[in-house]
């Protein structure tokens, strides 16, 4: 039986950034600390954040913090919400009892009865 199992390939943890074993242990420890501080953030996101911050030099990080470059939305977002959709969303937020809302509810009721 042992001879058969020798040929079976074993799972190897992916290491796309080629961290050493010591760096992987340090990363795991830091992610645990971050997860305790931010329990609502998924660990995968914390993992990506750690990788992002490790690749940046100290000057770049200091510049990002001091200029608050990521604390406000971009001037030209990649996927802006079309104006018509934004207006419709605001209408629903203002008053849930609008005519459009009533029409949607009545059409749901009719489709349910059929």
Image: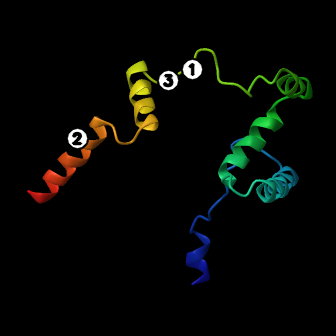
* Image point (68%, 52%), residue name: 41
Mark 1 or mark 2: name the one nearer the start of the chain: 1
Camera-nearest residue between 65 and 50: 65
User: What separation in Å lies between label 3 and label 1 (alpha carbons)?
Assistant: 6 Å
Q: Where is residue 72 in the image (x, y as percent from the top left)?
A: 70, 25
* Image point (58%, 69%), residue name: 7
Residue 113: quadrant of the picture: bottom left
| Disc assigned to residue 103 | 2
User: What separation in Å lies between label 1 and label 2 (alpha carbons)?
Assistant: 34 Å
Mark 3 or mark 2: name the one nearer the start of the chain: 3
Please indicate whether residue 64 sits to the left or right of residue 99 in the image: right
Within 10 Å of disc 1 (Cα), the crowding (few <14, some 14-19, many 20+) is few
* Image point (20%, 47%), residue name: 106
> Residue beneath label 1, please?
77
Camera-nearest residue between 11 and 34: 34
Q: Where is residue 5 in the image (x, y as percent from the top left)?
A: 58, 76
Q: Secondary structure beneath disc 2?
A: helix
Within 10 Å of disc 3 (Cα), the crowding (few <14, some 14-19, many 20+) is few
Q: Position of residue 9 (x, y in %)?
A: 58, 64
Please indicate whether residue 23 sits to the left or right of residue 76 in the image: right
* Image point (50%, 23%), residue name: 79
Q: The C terminus appears in which quarter of the rendering? A: bottom left
> Residue beneath label 3, please?
79
């Amino acid at each position: 039986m042992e001879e058969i199992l020798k040929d079976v390939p074993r799972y190897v943890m992916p290491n796309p950034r080629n961290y050493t074993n010591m760096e992987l242990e340090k990363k795991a420890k830091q992610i645990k600390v971050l997860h305790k501080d931010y329990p609502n953030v998924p660990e995968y996101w914390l993992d990506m954040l750690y990788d992002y911050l490790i690749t940046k030099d100290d000057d770049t990080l200091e510049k990002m913090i001091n200029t608050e470059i990521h604390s406000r939305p971009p001037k030209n977002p990649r996927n802006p919400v079309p104006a018509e959709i934004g207006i419709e969303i605001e209408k629903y937020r203002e008053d849930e009892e609008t005519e459009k809302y009533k029409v949607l509810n009545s059409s749901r009721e009719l489709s349910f009865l059929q």
